[in-house]
Image (cartoon, rainbow, N blue to C red):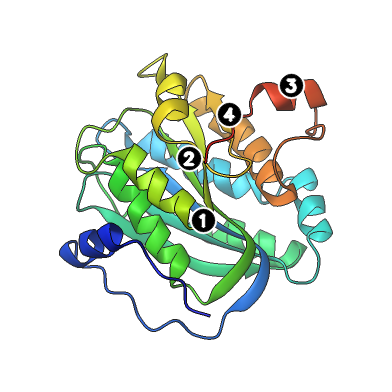
């Protein structure tokens, strides 16, 4: 079944050169997940590689693999978007169905060997969210849940409003979770909670630096597969999980 996009988002996508192809018959999955990775000028090559390695390692983590098994035979559909300025969003890893350990390890290897396709630029969080929404709406999958996982180390300084993009995504039932990297802006978590993160079960995790990205990503991916963080995380407690949850936004 096709899914209609808000009129404002359609106009932005057309102006940005994105064309929505006719939707194929949707394959049912437990979760549709876009991993949207910051590749702006504040992210050097080493920091980019730490992000890729952190995502790859998360799909190899025993707790995440167990969560994938619990997701059932439908599995999940995952993709990777690299982004920076208003006109710079690249589909680095296409939609991939992961229905078990072998699929997860293969996806990890693909991520680990994916080079940087967006090399610097401004930070356009709103445009990144809009691009991820389009990709989610035209991917040939239909998830029980749809999530955009945005990671970054700075506030938006170009393009459309992240809050407006969030509202458009939420109107379609898409949740936006955040991973705020605090090395550049110690108060970035507040910004993400106020204007980026939102939707059913939305939550935010933080990493003090890119060196901490892998640990945060493992926890984040686990919660995104099993659902909102209402149960104990591996190596944590239910109370800790609740403390990282963002306020529910509609």
Please provide percent x and percent y for residue 21: 35, 80
Residue at left 44%, top 41%?
49
- The residues bearing labels 2 and 3 have C-alpha atoms spaced at a distance of 24 Å
Residue 50, percent from left and from top: 48, 37
> Pointer 4: what residue?
247
CB-based contact (under 8 Å), mark 1 and mark 2 = no
Give the class, few, some or many, for how many residues have Cα within 10 Å of label 1's Cα (few <14, many ≥20).
many
Distance (Cα) linking label 4 and label 1: 31 Å
Most foreground residue, 210 or 192: 192
Q: Position of residue 160 (x, y in %)?
A: 23, 43
Of discs 2 and 3, which sits in the foreground?
A: 3
**Secondary structure beneath label 3:** helix
Q: Is residue 139 left or right of residue 61?
A: left
SS for tag 4?
A: loop
Q: Which label sits in the foreground, 4 or 2?
A: 4
Image depth: mark 4 or mark 3 in front: 4
Distance from disc 4 to disc 3, alpha carbons, whole Å, reads 15 Å
Residue 68 placement, left or right of 79? right
Specify which label sits upstream in the sequence, 4 or 1: 1
**Dividing the picture into quarters, in which one does residue 153 lie?**
top left
Q: Which residue is mark 3?
A: 240
Few, some or many C-alpha atoms within 10 Å of disc 3 (few <14, some 14-19, many ≥20)? some
Q: Are marks 4 and 2 in contact (CB under 8 Å)?
A: no
Question: Is there a contact, CB below 8 Å, between mark 2 and mark 3?
Answer: no
Q: Nearer the viewer, residue 200 or 95?
A: 200
Tags 4 and 3 touching, CB below 8 Å: no
Q: Is residue 142 above or below residue 246?
A: below
Per the image, the residue denoted by label 1 is: 111
Q: Residue at 79% of width from left, 51% of height from top?
A: 67
Q: Earlier in the sequence, mark 1 or mark 2?
A: 2
Which residue corresponds to mark 2?
Answer: 51
Nearer to us: label 3 or label 1: 3
């Amino acid at each position: 079944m096709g899914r209609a996009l808000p009129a404002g988002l359609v106009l932005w996508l057309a102006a940005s050169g994105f064309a929505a192809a006719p939707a194929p018959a949707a394959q049912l999955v437990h979760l549709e997940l876009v991993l949207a990775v910051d590749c702006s000028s504040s992210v050097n090559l080493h920091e980019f590689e730490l992000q890729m390695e952190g995502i790859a390692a998360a799909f190899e983590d025993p707790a995440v693999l167990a969560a994938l098994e619990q997701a059932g035979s439908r599995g999940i559909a995952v993709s990777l978007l690299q982004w920076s300025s208003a006109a710079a969003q690249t589909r680095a890893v296409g939609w991939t169905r992961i229905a078990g350990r072998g699929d997860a390890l293969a996806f990890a290897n693909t991520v680990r060997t994916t080079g940087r396709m967006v090399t610097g630029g401004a930070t356009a969080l709103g445009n990144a969210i809009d691009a991820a929404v389009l990709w989610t709406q035209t991917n040939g999958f239909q998830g029980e849940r749809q999530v955009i996982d945005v990671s970054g180390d700075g506030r938006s300084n170009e393009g459309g409003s992240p809050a407006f993009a969030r509202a458009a995504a939420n109107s379609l039932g898409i949740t936006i979770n955040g991973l705020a990297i605090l090395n550049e802006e110690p108060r970035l978590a507040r910004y993400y909670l106020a204007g980026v993160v939102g939707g059913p079960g939305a939550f935010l995790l933080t990493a003090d630096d890119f060196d901490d990205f892998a640990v945060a990503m493992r926890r984040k991916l686990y919660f995104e597969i099993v659902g909102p963080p209402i149960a104990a995380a591996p190596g944590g407690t239910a109370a800790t999980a609740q403390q990282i949850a963002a306020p529910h936004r509609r």
